[in-house]
Image (cartoon, rainbow, N blue to C red):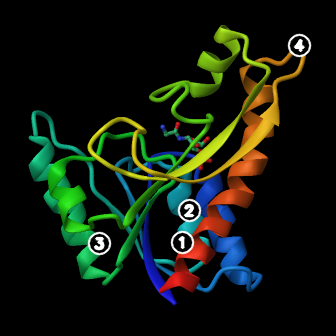
Amino acid sequence: MIRIAVLVSGRGSNLQAIIDAIAEGRLQAKIAVVVSNRPAAPALERAKKAGIPTMVVEARGGEARDTFDTRVVEAIREHRAEWVVLAGFMRIIGNVLLSAFPMRIINVHPSLLPAFPGLNAQAQALRHGVKVSGCTVHYVDGGTDTGPILAQAAVPVLEGDDEQSLSNRILVEEHRLLPAVLQKLSNER
Ligand code: GAR
C-alpha cells in the first residue's frame, strides 16, 4: 500500500478520480495529504469530504522557489507520504522537492508528450491541427513536462472541437489512466 501526497491547484477532478478508485477497491493506496498552493482550490473540498487531511502552502510574495518547495516537502513528510502526485498542480517543481522524492513524483498532463508541454496543452493541440491527442502520466524531472513517460492514452481530435470539448474527452482518459498507473506502481512495491 503506497502512501501518496496529491498536490493540487484547482478543480481536483483527477484527485477525485484517485479518491474514487481507492473507494471502489481499484487502487490500493492511501492519500496521506492533499496539498494546495491555492486556498480557494475546489480540490480541497473534495479532500475534506473524503476525510483526507489538507494543507495549503501558498507562495509568499517574492519567496524563492527553494523556500516554497521546502515548505511543501515538510507538509508531505509530516504526513509520511512516499509518493507525490501532481494532479493539476500549476507550479514548476524545483530541485528541493525533486531531490526529496527522487523518481517518486508523477504528473498527469493533457497531451501526448513530448508534444505540447506547458500551459494550455489542449489549445496548443487545436492550434497545430493534430488529429490525435491525449494524456500522459510521467515521472517529473527538472524540465517542464519532460520526465520519463509511464503511460499514455490517445483520443481523436474531432471536426468542430473547441478547447472545452477536447479537454473533456482527454479528461475522461486522465481519470482512468492516473489511478491505473498508481496501482501499477503500488503493485511493484
Ligand atoms: C488536468 O487536465 C491536468 O492534466 C492539467 O490540469 C488539469 C487539472 O484538472 N494539468 C496540466 O496542464 C499540468 N501541466 P483537475 O484539477 O480537475 O484534476
- Tell which of 41 and 15 is nearer to you: 15
Q: Are marks 4 and 2 in contact (CB under 8 Å)?
A: no
Rendered image quadrant of residue 85: bottom left
Q: Which residue is mark 4?
A: 160
Rendered image quadrant of residue 101: bottom left
Q: Is residue 17 left or right of residue 86?
A: right
Residue 89 position in % (x across, y down) = 43, 47
- Between discs 3 and 1, the one toward the N terminus: 1
| Residue 48: numbered disc | 1
Q: Is residue 91 left or right of residue 70?
A: right
Q: Which residue is mark 3?
A: 76
Residue 65 position in % (x across, y down) = 15, 43
- Distance from disc 4 to disc 1, alpha carbons, whole Å, reads 38 Å
* Figure disc tally: 4
Q: Are marks 3 and 4 in contact (CB under 8 Å)?
A: no
For label 2, the crowd category at 10 Å Cα-Cα, with few meaning under 14, some 14 to 19 and many 20 or more, is some
Residue type at mark 2 is: Glu
Q: Are marks 1 and 2 in contact (CB under 8 Å)?
A: yes
Residue type at mark 1 is: Lys
The residue mark sitting in front, 4 or 1, is 4
- Between discs 4 and 1, the one toward the N terminus: 1
* Secondary structure type for disc 1: helix
